[in-house]
Structures are given as C-alpha cells and as structure tokens.
Image (cartoon, rainbow, N blue to C red):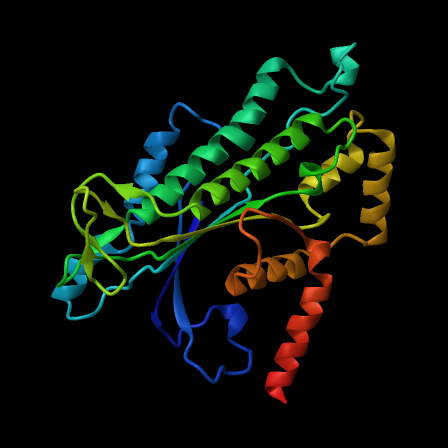
Amino acid sequence: LRLCRRGGESSDLPPAEANREPSPSPRRRLDVSLHAVDLSDIDGLDASLDELFASVSGGDEGEAEAEEEGRTAPTTTRAILINNAASLGPLGRCRADDPTVDFEGSLADLRSAIDLNVTSYAWLCRRFVRHFSSSLSPSGKGHRRRVVRVTVVNISSLCAVQPFPTMGAYCLGKAARDMFGAVLAKEEDQGPAKEEDGEVGDEEGHSSSSSSGGSSRPAVVVRVLNYAPGPLDTDMTRRLAECDALDESLRGWFRESLRGGTMVDLDDSARRLADLVVRDEFENGTHVDYYDLDGRQGEAEKEEADKEA
C-alpha cells in the first residue's frame, strides 16, 4: 500500500520534474510511505489495517510535535483510496468436466482469489471510510472534522459488466466489487450516520446535538467510483495472451492487441482517472469506463485551451 499526503510548499522536486518548466505557483511537497500488507491473509487483515491506520490518523499525532517545533501540522481534509489490489484467479470453463483441462486451479485457489479480490476489498473499504469519517480533532468550539470528503476508487474492468468465457472467477470478483461500491454509495447518499452520544461540531467548529440526546456527525461526503481503465499492456494481459486455459478467441485478441500496440496507454488512463476524481464529476457509485471519457476528455482539453487564450 502506497500512502501519499500533501505537505507544505516545497521547492524540492523529484528528478523527473527537475527539467520541466517552472510552475507559476509553489509546488506542494508530497510525503509518500509504503506499507506491505498481505490482503489475501484474511485472518491477519484487521491487525495489519490497525497498524496501517494508526500511521494515517489525519495528522492528530503530529500536532503536539508540530506545536513544539513552532509550525503548523498538515491537516488532512480529503482522503482517497485507490484500490488496484487483485488477481486473475483460476482461469478456465466454469463447468469443470475435466479439472486438469477446463479449470486452472482448485477449490482452495478459488477461495483464495475471492478472499483477495472481494473479501479484503470490502473490508478495506469499510475500514477506510469508517476511519476517515470519524477523524475528529479538538478545536476551540467543540470538535471539527479533519476529513470532509472521502473518495473510494475501485479499479474495475469491463469484466464487471460483461461475461468473458473462461474468466468466470475474475468476472465474479470484479462484479462483486462494483456492487459493493454501489451499495456503499447508496447508503452514504441517504445521509450522515448518527452519533450515539457526545457533542461534535461542523467544519467551522460549531457544535450541535439532537433533542433525543444524540447528535448528527458533521457531514462527510463519501464518494465511490468504479473505474475500468481499459485494456492495458501489463503483466496480467501478457499472461492472458499465453494462457492455454483462456478462451481461444480471447487469447488471440490479447495477442493481436499486444503485437499491434493497440492497448490503452497506462499514463493516459491514469490521467483520465485523476482528472475524474479531482473534478468529482461522476455519479456516486457508478461504473465508468476509460472509453466513456473520450468526449469528456475533449471538453476538458478545450476548457484548458480557452483558459490559456
């Protein structure tokens, strides 16, 4: 897991940025930390996530240290989870008349794939949203919420919405993730959760409580996007192009696409995703494909050109 947090202004640029034209506005420092978490280890997942979230609690732990050093601790106001952790799982026909030919794996292999692709995904989303939605920090007037917007991005696939022969386990995982995200978005759109007791405040620090003795949490916007990045030139697609268990027509398509260089450019797909998340212009919980953005990308480029003109 790669965690990034924007810090204060900095003139230190990574090597790749050093030779670019200077930006008219100051560059913000990006703090990156790496955490190795085995998302297929369901029994140890909670403990791993406890340790992970303890290091990204919205900056509360750093406030005392920052105060001693006479500086302002960075405040996390937006949390984004981009989950691309998944596997192909067993490949082959769903009806395994001859498991040695028709299905590339055992029951244990299928269960392991579901644990990684579905179970850990759903649990990580749940923990992520709960953690950042409940991040409160003290202020002069009750409490104020650090994080006001939480975005969950599931890296989806066309396999989530269309059946592909011999890719049953993979399609199952992608479809399940899409539906979990849609349900999460539907629940969050219904309104904020309720605190059992205590007093909290809105983003400006004004406290409020309900007449029943409980109180409403300050609104945290939770957004969910299922993004299908298009067919990419990755290790996964190269494996599919050579896999005997894959449907012959699919295997041929992957081979020809790789050979002809017609796969979607990785940087372009990532750029479209980043633009979509930053602009926040998508229906909550929806499935968006790379190719759905062709027209929107042109409009965005025209807007930038108009601004420059």
- Residue at image x 52%, y 72%? 17
- Residue at image x 67%, y 61%? 268
Q: Which residue lies furthest to the top in this view?
A: 97
On the question of residue 122 being in view, the answer is: yes
Image quarter for residue 243?
Answer: top right
Question: Which quadrant holds the C terminus?
Answer: bottom right
- Would you place residue 284 above or below residue 178 in this image? below
- Would you place residue 158 above or below residue 97 in this image? below
Q: Which of 50 and 32 is in front in this view?
A: 50
- Residue at image x 57%, y 57%? 282
Question: Which quadrant holds the N terminus?
Answer: top left
Instruction: Please give left or right for residue 93 compared with residue 234 in the image.
Output: right
- Would you place residue 130 above or below residue 61 in this image? above
Residue 293, image x, y percentages: 69, 60
Residue 24, image x, y percentages: 47, 85
Image quarter for residue 253?
Answer: top right
Residue 104, image x, y percentages: 71, 20
Instruction: Please give left or right for residue 225 compared with residue 46 in the image.
Output: right
Q: Which of 297 and 110 is in front in this view?
A: 297
- Residue at image x 29%, y 62%? 75
Q: Which residue lies furthest to the front in this view?
A: 211
Instruction: Please give left or right for residue 63 compared with residue 284 in the image.
Output: left
On the question of residue 39 being in view, the answer is: no
Residue 38, image x, y percentages: 45, 33
Q: Nearer the viewer, residue 187 or 56?
A: 187
Instruction: Please give left or right for residue 185 compared with residue 71 in the image.
Output: right
